[in-house]
């Protein structure tokens, strides 16, 4: 075998005594500049890919020109500038490929493809550089680069969250403008004449069509469809004319559409497969897949060779496998397979598509250009304007158009009809309808729990009863002698309150208002010979949360019990601590865009604790000092299932949230002269924090759920302001009765709370 070695060089332009040679740009070995938009180039280290994930190979081949087959040898000179006359990829000398140790004509499945991960709704751009350097052959002659083609080994993986119904690949200049096909010498354009080396996009062969890497041997076959490829529909192009755009639609292969519809599945939509490493091949073989709508684990196409090996591995006769393409795997075979340790993994190739195209490089202004991949989505998905709407639209589109994921018989047609009706409506109504499909105000359950428990804490700690000492009005919270001067060491209190909290809409949750009515009553006893007391309080709350768009409401009532203690210290110090428990019942109403009402009922609990420290200093008729507090709330809401609608009832998962509330500020009192009335006030900085809230929901009966409502964890900075009055209406050495009332407001960027509280205290 005689192989001509290459001495190709890239050098700066120089004056040479050669015939005039027309020069355009080529791609340097590392043409990558950056990516932007909805995606990135994945660097797959398992296939020995290194940063940046792609490379260019120019005028290089590894094929023996004198052999009948591919012999992988050192690179040699094989200068081809146009692929129009080439028939196979083994003839390619230039390509864009993954940045590993392989070449353009390395074996299929070697890891040559650039892995473009699409991660959002926006177009994905890869910015590349060109080079104006001359190339010289082994004789030192300048290579004519007036027309240089690069075949692209690409792969596209769908991580957008939604089905992709079509896409475009565009070539743009450094400023983002489409390349001008009328001036090919100054552009990068698709060579549509190079169709024989490949022009198109399709799923990998192992699933649809023979070959691929699902067991690369004589046993390999198309798992879902044998002998047939699964290409995306392609908008026709003129093979004689270069173009700046390649357009692709969905998939139309019957074996694909039967189970997966016409769209290109997102990573979250792909089914699980059962994989079996039956030989020494690089990849395990696919034996069965979990067809949710079809009853579970189902056989695909398996050859006799693979069946025999599978049966032998399980230790059963072939006939006991119960094999028939498209039929369920017998339960005993599933059990044997699991015992044997067969892997259950997502069938990733259903979200992977191979991209094949050829680019011709001209003389590029600025030596930069952009390859843009623009995905298309179903109209209902494209109409979403918020995160919540997008999530709901994707879910609805999936149930309507991905057959294997719809497990409620006959509902797909209903969802398709609903989508058609929505798209025929005005945009504003579409947005409202998409919001109504899911439970976008589900976080209101947790908010109700927090707000009602918080009101119970405030009723105990906000206003401390007065007492009397020799006829002088003194606050029990700031007078160490007030208890000792009284004949009774026991008093009771009752406090009703009203509050409203407004939660602004977030990107992933609807806005809502929470109205709370509560009443708390308790009894407190001084510990003999101390400046401390202990008490017990009970409470009742009634709360309602309503969405801002009138999409639903939640009603709740609850009962609480709390134990507390207070200790006076110094001349004006007070420490308060409490721990409590609240039990709540909820009833929700969610109004669908079709006019139905979905009703749900559930229960929940709140565990709460609080610690506060105040210290007031006498300044004439005023008392002023610092205050600090910390509160903890563990709010839990049980999951529930709605009823009342046909295809829109939701199953809502459990909710659990830990919330910490910390405050620091100043408080003050003013005793009106010759009056039994005291003015109270405070200003505080408050931070409310908590973990992200993940709420799992899904339509009843469907195997697939919505993507969880991941509501950003509470992290609110608030200004907390309060003002109130105490007035003693009866006081003597043995008893005292006081009334109090006040206003409290908490204000933040996306939240505010306002409330009023009144109460009565009496010694016994």
Image (spheres, rainbow, N blue to C red):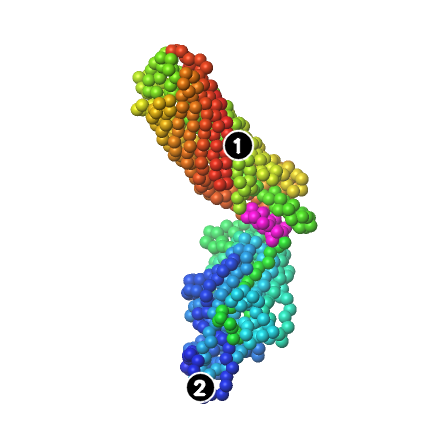
- Above or below residue 557? Residue 707 is below
The front one of 483 and 626 is 626
The front one of 467 and 616 is 616
Q: Which residue is mark 1?
A: 500
Instruction: Give the position of the C terminus as an image quadrant.
Output: top left
- Residue 396 shows in the view: yes
The front one of 389 and 754 is 754
Mark earlier in primary sequence (1, 2): 2
Instruction: Give the position of the N terminus as an image quadrant.
Output: bottom left
Q: Which residues are magenta?
A: 380-401
Residue 311 x %, y % = 51, 58
Q: Residue at x 48, y 71 (%)?
A: 367
Query: In terms of secondary structure, what is the magenta stretch mainly?
Result: helix
Residue 143 vs residue 196: left or right? left
Q: Residue at x 44, y 62 (%)?
A: 43
Magenta segment includes 389: yes
Residue 514 x %, y % = 54, 34
- Above or below residue 28? Residue 457 is above
Residue 593 vs residue 223: left or right? right
Residue 181 sits in quarter? bottom right
Q: Looking at the rendered structure, which numbered label has been put on residue 16? A: 2
- Above or below residue 669? Residue 150 is below
- Residue 316 shows in the view: no
């Amino acid at each position: 075998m005689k192989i001509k070695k290459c001495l190709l060089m890239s050098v700066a332009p120089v004056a040479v005594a050669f015939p005039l040679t027309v020069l355009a740009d080529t791609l340097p070995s590392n043409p990558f500049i950056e990516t932007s938009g909805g995606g990135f180039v994945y660097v797959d280290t398992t296939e020995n890919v290194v940063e940046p994930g792609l490379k260019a190979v120019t005028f290089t081949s590894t094929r023996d020109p004198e052999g009948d087959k591919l012999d992988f040898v050192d690179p040699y000179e094989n200068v081809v500038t146009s692929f129009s006359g080439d028939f196979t990829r083994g003839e390619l000398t230039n390509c864009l490929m993954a940045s590993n140790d392989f070449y353009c004509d390395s074996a299929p499945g070697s890891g040559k493809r650039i892995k473009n991960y699409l991660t959002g709704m926006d177009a994905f751009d890869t910015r590349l550089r060109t080079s104006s350097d001359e190339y010289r052959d082994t004789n030192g002659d300048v290579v004519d680069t007036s027309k240089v083609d690069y075949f692209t080994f690409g792969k596209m993986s769908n991580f957008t969250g939604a089905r992709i119904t079509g896409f475009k690949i565009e070539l743009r200049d450094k400023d983002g403008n489409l390349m001008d096909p009328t001036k090919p010498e100054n552009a990068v354009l698709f060579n549509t004449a190079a169709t024989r080396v490949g022009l198109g996009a399709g799923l990998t062969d192992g699933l649809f069509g023979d070959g691929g890497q699902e067991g690369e041997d004589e046993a390999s076959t198309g798992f879902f469809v044998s002998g047939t490829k699964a290409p995306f529909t392609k908008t026709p192009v003129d093979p004689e004319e270069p173009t700046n755009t390649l357009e692709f639609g969905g998939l139309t292969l019957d074996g694909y559409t039967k189970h997966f519809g016409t769209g290109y599945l997102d990573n979250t939509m792909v089914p699980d497969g059962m994989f079996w490493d039956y030989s020494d091949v690089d990849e395990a073989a696919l034996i069965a897949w979990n067809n949710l709508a079809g009853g579970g684990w189902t056989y695909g196409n398996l050859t006799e060779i693979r069946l025999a090996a599978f049966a032998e591995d399980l230790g059963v006769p072939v006939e006991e496998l119960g094999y028939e393409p498209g039929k369920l795997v017998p339960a005993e075979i599933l059990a044997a397979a699991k015992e044997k340790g067969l892997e259950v993994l997502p069938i990733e190739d259903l979200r992977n598509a191979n991209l094949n195209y050829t680019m011709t490089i001209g003389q590029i202004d600025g030596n930069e250009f952009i390859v843009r991949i623009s995905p298309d989505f179903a109209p209902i998905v494209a109409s979403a304007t918020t995160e919540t709407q997008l999530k709901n639209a994707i879910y609805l589109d999936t149930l309507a158009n991905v057959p294997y994921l719809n497990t409620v018989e006959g509902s797909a047609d209903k969802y398709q009809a609903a989508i058609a009706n929505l798209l025929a409506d005005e945009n504003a109504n579409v947005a409202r309808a998409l919001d109504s499909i899911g439970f976008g105000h589900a976080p209101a359950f947790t908010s109700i729990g927090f707000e009602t428990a918080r009101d119970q804490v405030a009723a105990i700690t906000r206003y401390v009863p007065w007492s009397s000492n020799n006829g002088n009005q003194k606050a029990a919270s700031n007078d160490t002698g007030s208890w000792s001067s009284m004949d009774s060491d026991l008093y009771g209190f009752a406090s009703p309150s009203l509050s409203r909290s407004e939660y602004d809409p977030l990107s992933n949750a609807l806005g809502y208002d929470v109205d709370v009515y509560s009443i708390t009553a308790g009894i407190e006893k001084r510990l003999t010979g101390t400046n401390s007391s202990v008490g017990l309080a009970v409470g009742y709350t009634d709360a309602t949360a309503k969405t801002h768009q009138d999409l639903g409401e939640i009603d709740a009532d609850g009962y609480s019990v709390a134990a507390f203690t207070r200790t006076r210290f110094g001349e004006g110090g007070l420490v308060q601590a409490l721990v409590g428990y609240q039990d709540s019942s909820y009833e929700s109403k969610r109004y669908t865009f079709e006019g139905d009402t979905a009703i749900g009922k559930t229960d929940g609990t709140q565990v709460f604790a609080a610690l506060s420290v105040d210290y007031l200093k006498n300044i004439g008729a005023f008392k002023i000092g610092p205050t600090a507090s910390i509160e903890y709330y563990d709010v839990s809401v049980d999951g529930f299932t709605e009823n009342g609608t046909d295809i829109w009832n939701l199953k809502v998962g459990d909710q659990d949230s830990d919330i910490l509330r910390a405050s620091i500020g100043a408080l003050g009192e003013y005793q009106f002269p010759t009056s039994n009335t005291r003015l109270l006030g405070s200003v505080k900085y408050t931070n409310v924090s908590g973990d992200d809230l993940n709420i799992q929901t899904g339509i009843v009966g469907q195997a697939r759920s919505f993507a969880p409502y991941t509501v950003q964890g509470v992290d609110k900075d608030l200004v907390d302001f309060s003002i109130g009055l105490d007035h003693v209406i009866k006081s003597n050495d043995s008893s005292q009765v006081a009334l109090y009332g006040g206003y409290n407001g908490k204000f933040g960027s996306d939240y505010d709370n306002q409330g009023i509280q009144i109460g009565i205290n009496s010694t016994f």
